[in-house]
């Protein structure tokens, strides 16, 4: 299997290097076209996200190696002064397929089990299909990866539990209030952290909530993006604070936005109905004395980090099950590839035997009656099928091993030398026992 994967990711390169290597959609389209048009690749796929840029190639020329592809990508991006081959990883054949499965299943992600990567993998595949740069190896690899990722998601707990501050905050609101549909929620801030918290709220079927921010235009922009039209002017924050059951803050700056006196006044207007406040700011947005107000539950990043650490540990415990699922499909992928390799041999074997049968029957066709010829034809057909049964079964069964049953069968039955429509697989150990 002449498949090569090269790239940079969070394990091999800093964010500065990853930014230099990254490819947007336009650049990916251009590179895919170059690789195919120049015959460098017969198949190609590019996966580029914030944490990785990876190139999967079935070489079209003998000189195309992992080193060749690294240099080609560096030159294509014009980054030879900043980036070297040492910033790249490389995988071959089964190793490349395994790595792709690991990526799709989010066990190679910066955040273990993150759910966004499978969508990014699918988008990358769709782009390659659109550019007509995929073929049998990459098509099969991608569709198998999608299936593996789906089973990992449904049959393991790798993606369960919050592992980001924003998601943990929303998960905590669900634990405190099982039904969020009738709760008034205020989001203070319109930056990245606030946006993630808002998206997670929408994922939890929260239809609407208020957004406030120092800059009104940013609050309005976020509200429009998310489809929630409720804006609270920042100057009304303290007077209207009592209306909210849940307050999530995520703003920059060193000053506390909400002090104990603000919450104390709000709680009097709420007639002591509980309020949950989640402080996602660093430095903290909420003054510590807020926690002293009765019926107010204040949680900050440290509290959420405990939840995250616990969930990450649970995810790590799922890794053996995930790797077992990946291993099974990796073996099936290799078997599929070997079946492509042996198919021409089986066809040649059948053709040779049936050609001999036809020639021998032709010799006696005019020496026997039509009835006898018909019986002899049926008998010859049965004999040829029985003779072929064992070698065909053997070549199919042994095609999963690292021995070379194809050439053995071709030699035994004196078949012509096979042209390499499918180059031989490169497996250092028996695929049945392969672990890496």
Image (spheres, rainbow, N blue to C red):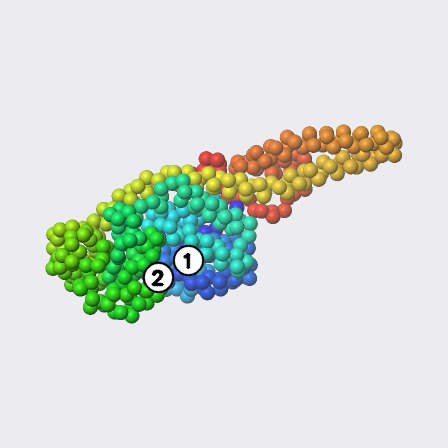
Could you tell me how many numbered marks the image carries? 2
Tell me where residue 159 appears, x and y as whole percent: 35, 46
Residue name at image x 31 percent, y 46 percent:
161
- Residue 144 position, x and y percent, is 49, 46
Image quadrant containing the C terminus: top left
Q: Nearer the viewer, residue 166 or 131?
A: 166
Judge left or right: residue 30 versus residue 282: right
Residue drawn at x 28%, y 65% is 231
Question: How far is mark 2 from mark 1, CA to CA?
Answer: 25 Å
- Residue 33 image position (x, y, % from top left): 52, 62
In screen coordinates, is 94 left or right of 307? Answer: right
Answer few, some or many: residues within 10 Å of disc 1's Cα (few below 14, many 20 plus, some between 14 and 19): many
Q: Which residue is rendered at x = 42% and y = 62% of the image? A: 23
Tell me where residue 89 appears, x and y as whole percent.
40, 52
| Disc assigned to residue 226 | 2
**Which residue is at the front of the view, 223 or 65?**
223
Q: Is 224 situated left or right of 130 in this image?
A: left
- At label 2, counting other C-alpha atoms closer than 10 Å, the crowd grade (few under 14, some 14-19, many 20 or more) is some
Q: Which residue is mark 1?
A: 48
Q: Is residue 269 left or right of residue 323?
A: left
**Vertical order, 147 against 196 (above or below):** above
Question: With respect to residue 124, does 316 lie above or below?
Answer: above
Viewer-side label of 2, 1? 2
As displayed, is residue 5 above or below residue 28? above
Q: Residue at x 42, y 49 (%)?
A: 104
**Residue 413 in sight in this render:** yes
* Mark drawn on residue 210: none
Q: Nearer the viewer, residue 401 or 340?
A: 340
Counting residues from the start of the chain, the first of labels 2 and 1 encountered is 1
Q: Secondary structure at mark 2?
A: helix
Secondary element type, mark 1: strand
Circles 2 and 1: CB atoms closer than 8 Å: no
């Amino acid at each position: 299997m002449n498949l090569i994967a090269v790239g940079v990711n969070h394990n091999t390169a800093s964010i500065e290097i990853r930014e230099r290597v990254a490819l947007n959609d336009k650049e990916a389209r251009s590179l895919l076209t170059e690789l195919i048009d120049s015959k460098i690749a017969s198949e190609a796929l590019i996966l580029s996200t914030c944490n990785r840029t990876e190139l999967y190639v079935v070489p079209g020329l003998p000189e195309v190696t992992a080193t060749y592809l690294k240099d080609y990508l560096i030159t294509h991006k014009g980054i030879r002064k900043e980036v070297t081959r040492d910033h790249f990883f490389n995988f071959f054949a089964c190793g490349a397929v395994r790595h792709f499965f690991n990526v799709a299943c989010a066990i190679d992600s910066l955040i273990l089990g993150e759910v966004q990567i499978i969508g990014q993998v699918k988008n990358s595949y769709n782009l390659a299909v659109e550019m007509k740069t995929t073929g049998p190896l990459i098509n099969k690899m991608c569709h198998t990866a999608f299936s593996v990722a789906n089973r990992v998601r449904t049959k393991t707990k790798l993606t369960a539990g919050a592992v980001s501050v924003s998601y943990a905050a929303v998960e905590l609101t669900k634990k405190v209030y099982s039904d969020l549909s009738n709760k008034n929620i205020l989001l203070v801030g319109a930056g990245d952290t606030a946006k993630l918290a808002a998206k997670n709220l929408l994922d939890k079927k929260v239809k609407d909530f208020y957004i406030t921010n120092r800059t009104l235009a940013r609050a309005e922009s976020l509200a429009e993006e998310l489809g929630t039209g409720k804006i609270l002017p920042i100057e009304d924050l303290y007077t209207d604070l009592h209306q909210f059951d849940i307050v999530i803050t995520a703003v920059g700056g060193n000053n506390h936005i909400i002090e104990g006196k603000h919450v104390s006044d709000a709680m009097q207007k709420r007639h002591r109905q509980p309020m949950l406040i989640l402080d996602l700011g660093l430095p903290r947005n909420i003054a510590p004395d807020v926690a002293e107000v009765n019926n107010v539950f204040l949680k900050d990043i440290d509290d959420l980090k405990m939840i995250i650490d616990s969930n990450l540990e649970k995810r790590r415990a799922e890794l053996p099950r995930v790797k077992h699922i990946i291993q099974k499909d990796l073996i099936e992928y290799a078997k599929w590839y070997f079946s492509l390799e042996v198919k021409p041999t089986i066809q040649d074997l059948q053709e040779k035997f049936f050609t001999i049968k036809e020639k021998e029957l032709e010799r006696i066709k005019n020496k026997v009656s039509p009835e006898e010829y018909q019986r002899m034809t049926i008998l010859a057909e049965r004999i040829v099928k029985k003779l072929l049964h064992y070698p065909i079964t053997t070549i199919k069964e042994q095609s999963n091993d690292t021995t070379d049953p194809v050439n053995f069968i071709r030699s035994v039955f004196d078949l012509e030398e096979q042209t390499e429509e499918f180059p031989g697989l490169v497996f250092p150990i028996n695929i049945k026992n392969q672990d890496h």
